[in-house]
Amino acid sequence: MFGSLWRWLVRFFYPPTPEELNLSRRALLVSCITGAASGLMFKAGARGQGKSFNPALIRPPGAVGEEEFLARCIRCGGCMKVCPTNAIQPTLLEAGLEGLWSPLLKMKIGYCEYECTLCTQVCPTDAIKPLEAEEKKKIKIGLAFFDKNRCLPYASARSCIVCEEHCPTPKKAIWFEEVQVVNPRGEKLMVKQPHIDPELCIGCGICEKKCPMADQGAVYVTSVGETRNPRNQILLPANPYGGVPYSGN
């Protein structure tokens, strides 16, 4: 697909001479498909219009709504340069082509430092609004979830409290339920299985970064629940006309 897109761009900026022009049905079909695919790529996942949101599109705290964010952000990289954990990285296609090279957080690389407001202070266009530390601590940039097939207390009947130890919120967003499990040897033992409190989790991602599962964390953060978008929530608001969850249409 990218090869076709590249050829289309070359043809657009360097149109063929009359001798090169090919009006065959195949050429016409390829051109139509490429144009349609390009249009979809420009819009895919960028603005969260409709029912779907890109779970990987976690914007820095203080980021304005996606449409305004893309209009304001000049891709200067200032927020990326000052991030102390290197969590803020440039997007590839997470926000579509129109969002290329705009900032997002990748928790596998870093995390959003609880006390830090540097990215909110350096943005020259207010795509990321300036925030004081106490205001920033209340902003949700996403929500953490556990993969019970990988989390040690769930999958291997082994104790692990690393995520809870690193959780920075004053009242921990990660809490434990002590349950009796059976290990692979058939022995019964008590382990603490972690849970996320969605009301307290701010999506900072330190739990994902610090998870001892080296290849892929057993806890991960998605963009759902972000403060800046009232429609990208874990539960949609009730329909005032019938009690059925509102679909957004």
Image (spheres, rainbow, N blue to C red):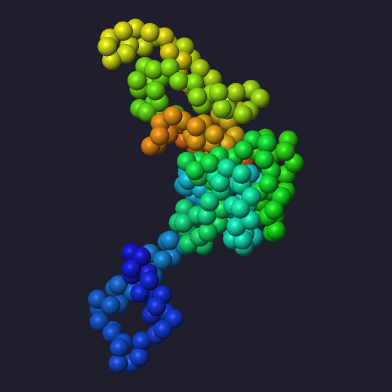
The residue that appears at 68% across and 46% down in the rendered structure is 118
**Drawn side of residue 14 relative to residue 60, left or right:** left
- Residue 16 position, x and y percent, is 36, 87
The residue that appears at 25% across and 78% down in the rendered structure is 25
- The image quadrant that residue 169 belongs to is top right
The residue that appears at 63% across and 56% down in the rendered structure is 78
- Residue that sits furthest to the bottom in the current view: 19
Q: Nearer the viewer, residue 199 or 117?
A: 117
125 over 23 or under it: above or below: above
Q: Could you tell me which quadrant the N terminus lies in? A: bottom left
81 over 227 or under it: above or below: below
Number of on-image labels = 0
Q: Does residue 233 show up?
A: no
- Residue 159 position, x and y percent, is 43, 17
**Drawn side of residue 173 relative to residue 209, left or right:** right
- The image quadrant that residue 206 belongs to is top right
Q: Does residue 82 show up?
A: yes
142 over 171 or under it: above or below: below
7 over 170 or under it: above or below: below
- Residue 108 position, x and y percent, is 47, 41
Q: Nearer the viewer, residue 150 or 68?
A: 150
**Drawn side of residue 161 relative to residue 153, left or right:** right
- Residue 49 position, x and y percent, is 52, 52
The residue that appears at 48% across and 45% down in the rendered structure is 56
